[in-house]
Amino acid sequence: MRRGLLALAFVLPAAAAAACGEAPDRGSAEPRDPLLRPAQFTETAPPRFAVRFETTAGEFVVEVRREWAPIGADRFYNLVQAGYYDDTRIYRVVPGFMAQFGIHGDPFIHRAWARALLRDDPVVESNSRGRVTFAKAGPNSRTAEVFISTVENARLDADGFAPFGEVVEGMEVVDAFHAGYGDGPPRGEGPYAAMAHARGNEYLDEEYPELTRIIRAVVVDAEG
């Protein structure tokens, strides 16, 4: 049964994105959000950098090491620099497993990134407690959602989940993320990922108002 939970843990339904429809044409008077164009975010990350997350549960810091997973590290760096994780929700917290976030509050932006698939990195480091890794639904399917292992999850290594960083400050904050809603369907009654993909923060705030919120994420230290 535990293996079944892991198999379902990181499914990112493509059908959920399709429910969003196309982004509206806002006209020249209102510039489109740059995040609607993932292809323009291609900067190479520094060899090492740190990201400070400010949340409603407190602050934590992730140190990223590009040598662990360069493709994932570059994507994460670009997402943070672009403000993608600002005002998002830590929507899935499974005690004894992990905490997951990265569904954008604007469903049109989420849909854009759901199409921007990444090739897998080889697994160099194990998914130990505190490690940060992209969620995925199968080979070469990473997009923008990530999870933090809150226990030793080495069993994920063989499935191709490649950590790109680790929490170096504030792991007690990660442990305090709101977990009262439980896992999502079909394993629990927590946030339904497909609905979160389709409606963004509107759905999460309306149905699950106690979720821990990411206020902002910023690069605070980078090795040149």
Image (cartoon, grey):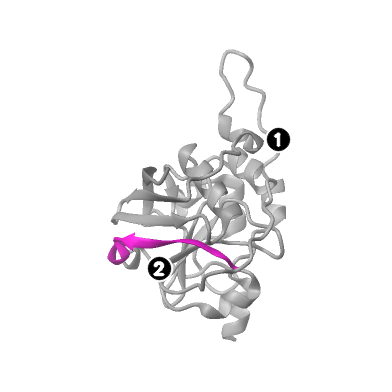
Q: CA distance from mark 2 to mark 1?
A: 37 Å
Q: Observer-nearest residue: 57 or 121? A: 121
The residue that appears at 62% across and 56% down in the rendered structure is: 194
Quickly name the residue at label 2: 130
Image disc number at residue 22 = 1
Picture quadrant of residue 149: bottom left
Q: Is residue 210 located in the magenta-colored stretch of the structure?
A: no
| Dot 2 amino acid type | Gly
Q: Observer-nearest residue: 19 or 62? A: 62
The residue that appears at 57% across and 35% down in the rendered structure is: 35
Q: Quadrant of the C terminus?
A: top left
| Dot 1 amino acid type | Glu
- Crowding at dot 2, Cα within 10 Å, few <14 / some 14-19 / many 20+, comes out as many
The residue that appears at 56% across and 74% down in the rendered structure is: 187
User: From which residue to which does the magenta span run?
Assistant: 161-173
Total numbered labels: 2
Q: Is residue 162 located in the magenta-colored stretch of the structure?
A: yes
In the image: residue 112, left or right of residue 91: right
Q: Position of residue 137 (x, y in %)?
A: 67, 63
Q: In the rendered image of this protein, does residue 33 appear above or below residue 179?
A: above
Image disc number at residue 152 = none
Q: Observer-nearest residue: 105 or 31? A: 31
Q: Quadrant of the N terminus?
A: bottom right
Q: In the rendered image of this protein, does residue 43 appear above or below residue 16?
A: above
